[in-house]
Amino acid sequence: MGMSVTISVATEQDAEQIFKLQYLCFQSEAALYGNYRIDPLVQSLDSVRQEVVSDCVFVARLGDEVVGSVRGRITEDGEACISRLCVHPRLQGHGIGARLLRAAEEALAQERGATRFRLHTGRRSEGNLRLYRRVGYQTVGTSKGTDGVEMIVLEKQAGTYAATA
């Protein structure tokens, strides 16, 4: 690959690259469900900018290019909600998603006091489910997204890291 991928906290200047990457990465999810109105595809750039400022957002960089991102925030009940994990299609399968997830988990636990993490993914998203289970998440329920997609809800305790790749 030549250069190594680095993980760092996102800055406001990253918002546009995160927005474009998210749009690219979630096309395959939209195709899987036959629904191109899924939440990540209809989110506005302004909304992404607000999340970069207020939430715990990490990016994976290859040189100056943002090639992955993840967001986390603390909910009213004190749980950490992790969302919008995405890695550029050409770099998937190299452990970048697991590294992003771990960076978000560590920051949410250390800086914001999270003791439990929760995330969700579409029930047909087998690759996502494999990753989440490999890093210690367990299915705790199901839900339906605002976009109508059937979701699987997964959780794990802070400090439980199975694999990282």
Image (cartoon, grey):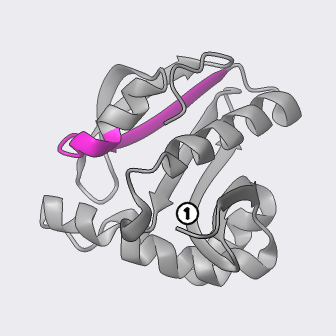
Say which quarter of the image contains residue 64: bottom right
Q: Is residue 75 visible to us here? A: no
Say which quarter of the image contains residue 33: bottom left
Residue 7 versus residue 117 in the image, above or below: below
Q: Where does label 1 land, which residue? A: 68
x then y, percent, for residue 149: 23, 52
x then y, percent, for residue 165: 49, 36
Residue visible at 52% across and 67% down? 1
Specify few, some or many for label 1: CA neighbours under 10 Å numbering under 14, 14-19, or 20 or more: many
x then y, percent, for residue 92: 39, 57
- What range of the chain is rendered magenta? 116-128
Pick whichever, 40 or 86, lies toward us. 86
Q: Secondary structure at mark 1?
A: strand
Residue visible at 35% across and 67% down? 26
x then y, percent, for residue 10: 75, 64
Q: Is residue 10 left or right of residue 130?
A: right
Residue 63 versus residue 139 in the image, above or below: below
Say which quarter of the image contains residue 13: bottom right
Pick whichever, 89 or 18, lies toward us. 89
